[in-house]
Image (cartoon, rainbow, N blue to C red):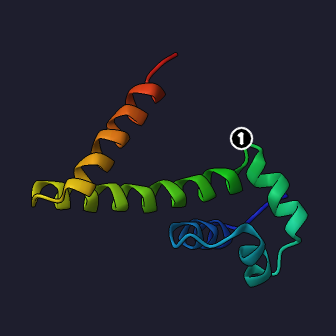
């Protein structure tokens, strides 16, 4: 399916706010199955917009965890260690 740039921006913004695919489809008046299929295709614009939005949200969560760890939070420090391990795992070919 082809999406306008405005729709792709909205998909990204909603994903940034952890909106479920089913809710995005309803809010944008898109067939849910079409949207799911497009998001599942890593080459589609909708997939890139959705994944970028999720990545932005997770980036902010991790950034906040790092700040809290630097301020002395043991729980946040454990999360930062886990994120570091995830990064290392993701670096593997």
Name the residue carrying label 1. Answer: 43
Q: In the image as oriented, which residue stretches furthest toward the left?
A: 71
* SS under mark 1: loop
Residue in front for this viewpoint, 31 or 59: 59
Residue occupying image coordinates x 81% and y 62%: 35
- From the viewer's perspective, is residue 77 above or below residue 36? above
Nearest the viewer among 30 and 20 is 20
Left or right: where does residue 59 sit relative to residue 4? left
Q: Is residue 63 left or right of residue 41?
A: left
Query: Residue visible at 80% across and 53% down?
Result: 38
Q: Residue at x 32, y 49 (%)?
A: 79
Judge from the rendering whether residue 91 lies leftward or rightward of residue 72; answer left or right: right
Residue 74 x %, y %: 20, 54
x, y percentage for residue 1? 85, 58
Residue 12: x and y in percent read 57, 65
Residue reaching furthest front? 74
Q: Toward which corner of the image does residue 27 lie, by quadrant?
A: bottom right
């Amino acid at each position: 399916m082809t999406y306008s740039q405005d729709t792709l921006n909205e998909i990204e913004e909603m994903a940034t706010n952890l909106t479920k695919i089913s809710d995005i489809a309803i809010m944008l008046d898109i067939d849910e199955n079409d949207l799911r299929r497009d998001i599942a295709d890593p080459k589609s614009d909708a997939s890139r917009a959705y994944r970028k939005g999720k990545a932005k949200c997770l980036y902010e969560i991790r950034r906040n965890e790092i700040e809290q760890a630097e301020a002395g939070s043991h729980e946040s420090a454990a999360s930062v260690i886990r994120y570091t391990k995830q990064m290392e795992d993701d670096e593997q070919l």
